[in-house]
Image (cartoon, rainbow, N blue to C red):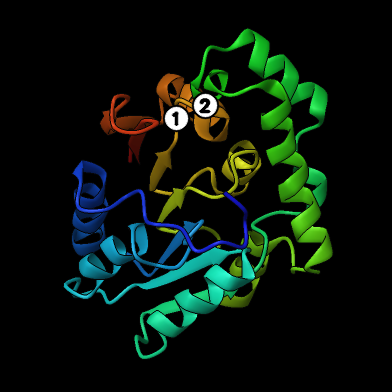
Amino acid sequence: MGITEIIQPEIKDDEFYAVISQIGAQLPARHILEIGSSSGAGSTEAWVKGITQNSAQPTLHCIEVSRPRFEVLQRTYASNKQVKCHWTSSVDLSRFPSKKEVIDFYHSVPSILNQYSLEQVLGWLEQDIDYIASAKAPTDGIRKILRDEQIYTFDAVLIDGSEFLGAAEFSEIYGAPIILLDDICGYKCHFPYQWLKKDPSYKCVAENTGLRNGYAAFQKIQ
C-alpha cells in the first residue's frame, strides 16, 4: 500500500477506539497530539468523539505527512475548531533508523514484520524516506507545534505514524501524562512499549497484544 493512497482506518469501533475516546472525554487536557492521523476516519474520529464531550475543550493536533490523506483529513475537520491539522513529518528525516538497525531488529526481535520478507520491509523504509524528501514535506512537526503553542509537553499523545519513527517520536514526547502506542508488536512502537513497561514513572492502564498489531496505554504516575 503506497503512502499516497487513501486507506481504510484500522482503529475503528474497537477496544482501542473506545480507550482513545474515553481519554479524550475525561482527561483535563489543553493539547492532545495524534501522530499518524491518515484521513481522519479512525483514531482521529475517536479523539473527536471524546474531546467534544470534554468540558476542558482540548485542542487535538493531528500530524499527517501523506499529502492526499492530509487533504481529506483537513476537509473532514475544517469546521471543527478543536482540531488542528498539520501536514508535516513528525521528526526530521535524520531520525529515521538506518537499514542496518532495521535488519538487526528483523533478525533479533520476533515481530509482525517477520511475516514479510526483509526486502519488502526495507522497501517500506526507503519509500517513507523518499516520499518525505520528494514531497518536500515540512519536518520536525512535533517540535514546531510545541513552539507555536508555547507549551512544554502535550497532555496526551498517540503514536501511530510511520512504522520506523516510533522510537524517535517517543523521545520527543516522553513525559506526557498519557502516552498511547499502536503497533507495539511491530518495529513502530516496540522500543517505546518496552521502555514504558519498565519505567517506574508510568503505569500501564490498558493493553492488548492480540488486537491487530497490539496497543497499549500508559499514564504517568503523579
Q: Which x, y percent locates residue 170? A: 57, 41
Residue 9, image quadrant? bottom left
Q: Nearer the viewer, residue 206 or 173?
A: 206
Q: Is residue 140 above or below residue 83?
A: above
Left or right: 39 with respect to 65? left
Q: Is residue 220 at all visible to an observer of this figure?
A: no
Image: 222 above or below 87:
above
Q: Secondary structure at mark 2?
A: helix
Q: Residues within 10 Å of mark 1 (few under 14, many from 20)?
A: many
Q: Residue furthest top?
A: 108
SS for callout 1: loop
Q: Position of residue 198 (x, y in %)?
A: 44, 19
- Which residue sits at x=73%, y=26%? 119
Q: x%, y% of residue 41?
A: 34, 65
Residue at the disc numbered 2: 190
Task: Please report the residue visible at 41 percent of the width from the left and 31 percent of the height from the top.
Answer: 201
Q: Image quadrant of residue 142?
A: bottom right
Is 55 left or right of 32, judged from the image as shown? left
For badge 2, the amino acid type reads His
Count the marks: how many? 2
Image mark for residue 184:
1
* Residue at the image point whose x is 20% and y is 53% from the top: 13
Q: Are marks 1 and 2 in contact (CB under 8 Å)?
A: yes
Q: Residue at x 30, y 63 (%)?
A: 47
The extreme bottom residue here reads 79
User: What is the three-letter code of the residue carrying label 1?
Assistant: Ile
The one of 220 and 60 positioned closer to us in this rendering:
60
Chain-order first, disc 1 or disc 2: 1
User: Tag on residue 16?
Assistant: none
Can you say whether 48 is above or below 22 in the image?
Answer: below
Q: CA distance from mark 1 to mark 2?
A: 5 Å
